[in-house]
Amino acid sequence: MDKTQGLKVTRRSILKTIPALSAISAGSSFFTKAACAQEPLEDGYTICDNCNQMPMCGIHFQRQGNIVVSVGNWKEHSGKLLCNKALATLQRLYNPNRLLYPMKRTNPKGSADPGFVRISWQEALATIAANMKKIRDQYGAEKLFIFCGDPKEPRPAAMRLARYFGTYHYGTESSVACRKGSLLAEQLVFGSEYSGGGCGPKTKSYMVMATNGAWSKPHGWWNMINAAKQRGVKIIVIDARRTKVAELADIHLQPKQGTDAALGAGICRVLFEEDLYNKPFCDKWVYGVEEYRNYCKDFTPEKTEAITGVPADLIVKAARM
Ligand code: SF4
């Protein structure tokens, strides 16, 4: 059955719900309120399944009739800090463009209107199977790449499908998109995971740039940075916003939007001028250091302040830290 029928969500109720989705406030437990039905407001508790099997954070929601109108932290639950993915649940649930059943393109690719029409699961599966057979007959089974994104539950089945079909080309979102590429690069360049690993035991200062891990990574990363703060690691946050992470900062630099590269050059100029960088490491591993040093010469603290709006003395202080 069409899920929209099950939930009795009409286009009208969706349109009423969506404006409320922008009313997100970091401090409130309930961050979305939809002024929809006249039904009584009821509380409910559930588990977030956005990360699949774990960490299963707790959700406290409110509903009016069959409409979920707010989603927030379940304060008594051990995983009580929802991340951005969970906080966007209502957008996901009620987005009018959400895919709910198989759709087939009826106009050629590149057409202004793809002409999608709804088809049955039977037709969808038969079409896919026929195309897979065509690929195998024409080019060989190994020319097919089977990719399985999130959720993760169908992965074993997709793997078996790839194996029995005869292709060894199987991939998942975790193998290509979920930071695996950057983790591999870190391992190749530094010999271990670096930014992903957070503060090491010898870390004395830690720079966070344009990320609000209190919301996007409320468990591992947020615990890591709080523990680091407690053991005396100095924290520099570069973010135009006053985030929860910025509240931990010893130095908070707030550049105007789009000027972060200039701020970086201004900080690096101080590092170069005062010989505060790891020269043996750069000599061994970094390309273009001399070119970058020359480029940064222009970015005096005063000029960097004029571009970014960050006070010159703070730029120098952060670089020295
Ligand atoms: S980390 Fe975020 S997406 Fe994952 S279970 Fe918790 S709230 Fe849901």
Image (cartoon, rainbow, N blue to C red):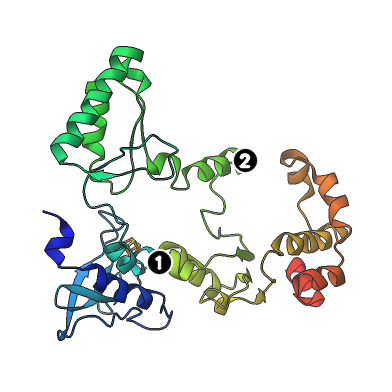
User: Taking the image as four quarters, which one is ligand 1 found in?
Assistant: bottom left
**Residue hosting label 2:** 189
State the SS at label 2. helix
In the rendered structure, which amino acid carries the disc numbered 2?
Val
Q: For the residue labelled by badge 1, is the local secondary structure a helix, a strand or a loop?
A: helix
Residue 258 appears left or right of 150: right
Q: Where is residue 169 in the image (x, y as percent from the top left)?
A: 36, 26
Taking the image as shown, residue 310 lies to the left or right of residue 65, namely right
Residue 223 visible in the current orientation? no
Q: Residue 52, position in %: x, y?
A: 27, 54
Q: Is residue 241 left or right of residue 110?
A: right
What amino acid type should be assigned to the residue bearing mark 1?
A: Asn
Give the number of the mark in front: 2 or 1.
1
At which x and y percent is residue 254?
A: 67, 74
Residue identifier under label 1: 84
Residue 29 badge? none
Q: Of residues 34 and 185, which is closer to you in this image?
A: 34
